[in-house]
Amino acid sequence: MDTGAKQIIKIFGDVQSKCPYSITLASGGFVDAVPGKVSDVDINLVTPDFKNLDLSPLVCLPARDPDRNDSRWIYRIAGYDRPVHIYAIADEKRATRAEKHRSNELMLNTRFPKLAFAAAILKSNGSGTEIAWAAILGYVNGENPYDMMAQSEDIIEARAQGVTEHAEHVLQWSTL
């Protein structure tokens, strides 16, 4: 595990030990892939009362609602070498989707390192993680890359295996 990934896990563990709520890690698929930027630590907290949470003893910067539709609040946690965000959200399905993205990204990184390298290049050039993976896995026009990355591990793995087999077949023919 690279240093950035270890830092994210360590920071999450520290936040988890201080947070009075049950939280889950929702980031870490491609750590520090964008040159000159450190990856943030995204944490999910599912609760129906997501506004004005008391997260003591964590030091919080002002919370914000990025969607402006009262669907979630992002609490920025101070005191770490990386940006740390707690996404407080009432919609468990939406929170679980981010966790599934992370799980699938880590599986792909481990089982398909060549594809992970290609997706990391796309990410380093400005694509979001899910969009980079969707491009590598051959998403169909109109398919939502975020929904695609939330599919079951078996489906994602089958797509990755198909891309790998196709690439190997093309390479075999190109060397004849």
Image (spheres, rainbow, N blue to C red):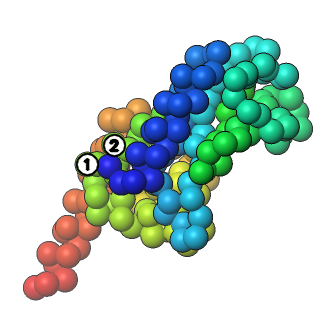
Q: Which residue is mark 2?
A: 107
Residue 37: image location, x then y, percent: 59, 64
- Give the SS element for disc 2: helix
Residue 88: name its quadrant. top right
Residue 55 drawn above or below residue 9: above
Q: Quadrant of the C terminus?
A: bottom left
Number of numbered discs overlaid on the protein picture = 2
Res 17 quadrant in image: top right
Q: Say left or right for 156 vs 111.
A: right
Kind of residue sitting beneath label 1: Arg
Q: CA distance from mark 1 to mark 2?
A: 6 Å
User: In the figure, residue 53 lies in which quadrant?
Assistant: top right
Residue 11 appears left or right of 117: right
| Residue 155 in the image: above or below residue 29 | above
Q: Amino acid at mark 2?
A: Met
Estimate the x, y position of residue 101 in percent, counting from the top left: 49, 40
The vertical placement of 161 against 45, above or below, is below
Position above or below: 98 against 145: above
Specify the farthest residue to the right: 68
Instruction: Name the residue at 32% across, 35% down.
Output: 154
Residue at (36, 54) in percent of width and height: 2
Q: Which circle marks residue 111 in the picture?
A: 1
Evaluate whether residue 91 shows in this view.
no
